[in-house]
Image: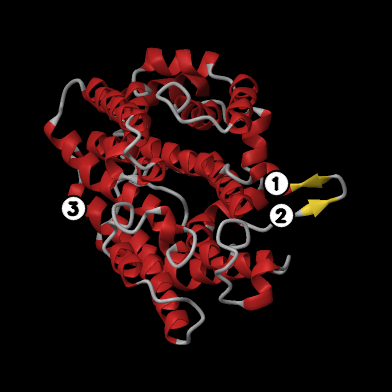
Amino acid sequence: MKTNPETSTQEAERNAPPKIPQQSTRKRSSYLPTLDGWRAIAIVIVMLDHSPTLALGPFNSNLFHGMGNFGVQVFFAISGLLICSRLLDEEEKTGTLQIRSFYIRRLFRIQPAALAYLGFILLLTVFHRLPLYTSGMVTAAILVRNFWGMDLRNTFTVGWPTVHYWSLSVEEHFYLVLPSLLFFVKRWRAEVLLGLALIGFGWRAFLLSNRATSLFSVEVRTDTCLCYLFLAAGTAVLLRHESIRKFATRYIRSFVVLPVALLLVLAHGRITALSALIPIFMVISTMLRPNDLVSKFLESAPLRFIGRISYSAYLWQEVFLTGNWAPTIRPFGWLNTSLLVWPAVFGTAIASYYLIEKPFIRLGHRLAPSATQGRPI
């Protein structure tokens, strides 16, 4: 009697023991290539703000002078969204917030390059290429540069080489506050973060209305800048709700957000709670729609590379690009006002990234492995 091979196979499959699915040990990647693209856009805006005027025929870079603050807002938007999302991803995967590991990775990510830059500034001071500004060096090293020595008398003269540490100070203070806040607040996280952001913007508005308060100090202090990062972090929590994420994916489109952002930048207006949403919407419009034309542009190889070295570029550009805001500071003489200053900045940033950043980032990840896979190191 002949047996049907197909029937025999089906019967064997029914009688076979159930297969146990193997749990993948591969980490879920949380790397978003478009973020590197936005980092590239942000650092170029900052650099064009700081550099001498570049001209090509009827076009010049004067338009970007004064836009550096918007570039920093884009960095704040990325940090708030990304850091909060990473912490919550690890909590979801492991059941708890990995705060100790987070701090170790942040320490090795930020401090080596930051201290190396300060060491170089100290060297230039010793060789009389830069004026001595002790309080600027010390407050930058301990990351409180945004509270001391920020008055206009020295910011654009002796204080210029370290003044950009104001934003590093704000971000480091955010890294200290956010994990603790998420640890103690288990429910209503989005409401608490957004509430703190609104309080911060209210505090900014009050100080700006007080004529005795320096406008510049309001723009750089932690108590008046954390609102940007809290706003982005609160948005990150909201986006974890499927309904909100679908709504944002449908309606927050780059072809709508980018023209509004351009108008905001051209107007050079003060950042309010409403306008501070624009950099956040810019970032999430491409995070949620990776196949959009803008997203593809941001994921192009040149922009992703510039985004990877953007932290080093932000550190080192300050001592090279002095022509617009601090023309009396010229540690490299003619180079500070030459077009060759741009390849000098990028060359130094690339060296800093490969010789300092990457080795220490890898060390930090070896000492405190992340539960989620981020950008390839």
Mark 3, residues whose alpha carbon is within 10 Å: few (<14), some, or many (≥20)?
Answer: few
Tag shown at residue 62: 1
Q: Secondary structure at mark 1?
A: helix
Q: Residue flagged by tag 2: what amino acid is it?
A: Thr
Seen from the viewer's position, the closer of residues 151 and 211 is 211
Tag shown at residue 53: 2
Of badges 3 and 2, the one in the foreground is 2
Q: Do the residues bearing badges 1 and 2 touch, measured as CB atoms within 8 Å?
A: yes
Q: Which residue is at a point 37% across and 64% down the rendered structure image? A: 362
**Left or right of residue 172, residue 95 in this image:** left
Seen from the viewer's position, the closer of residues 55 and 209 is 209
Task: Tell me which numbered mark, 1 or 2, is placed earlier along the sequence.
Answer: 2
Mark 2, residues whose alpha carbon is within 10 Å: few (<14), some, or many (≥20)?
Answer: some
Mark 1, residues whose alpha carbon is within 10 Å: few (<14), some, or many (≥20)?
Answer: some
Seen from the viewer's position, the closer of residues 23 and 251 is 251
Q: Secondary structure at mark 2?
A: loop
Seen from the viewer's position, the closer of residues 261 and 13 is 261
Q: Which residue is at a point 33% across and 67% down the rendered structure image? A: 363
Q: Residue flagged by tag 1: what amino acid is it?
A: Asn
Q: Which residue is at a point 30% across and 23% down the rendered structure image? A: 198
Q: Is residue 199 visible?
A: yes
* Residue 259: quarter of image: top right
* Residue 343: quarter of image: bottom right
Q: Position of residue 214 (x, y in %)?
A: 36, 43
Q: Which residue is at a point 43% across and 70% down the rendered structure image? A: 117
Q: Position of residue 189 (x, y in %)?
A: 22, 25
Q: Is residue 282 above or below residue 49?
A: above
Residue pointed to by mark 3? 100
Tag shown at residue 308: none
Q: Position of residue 109 (x, y in %)?
A: 36, 60
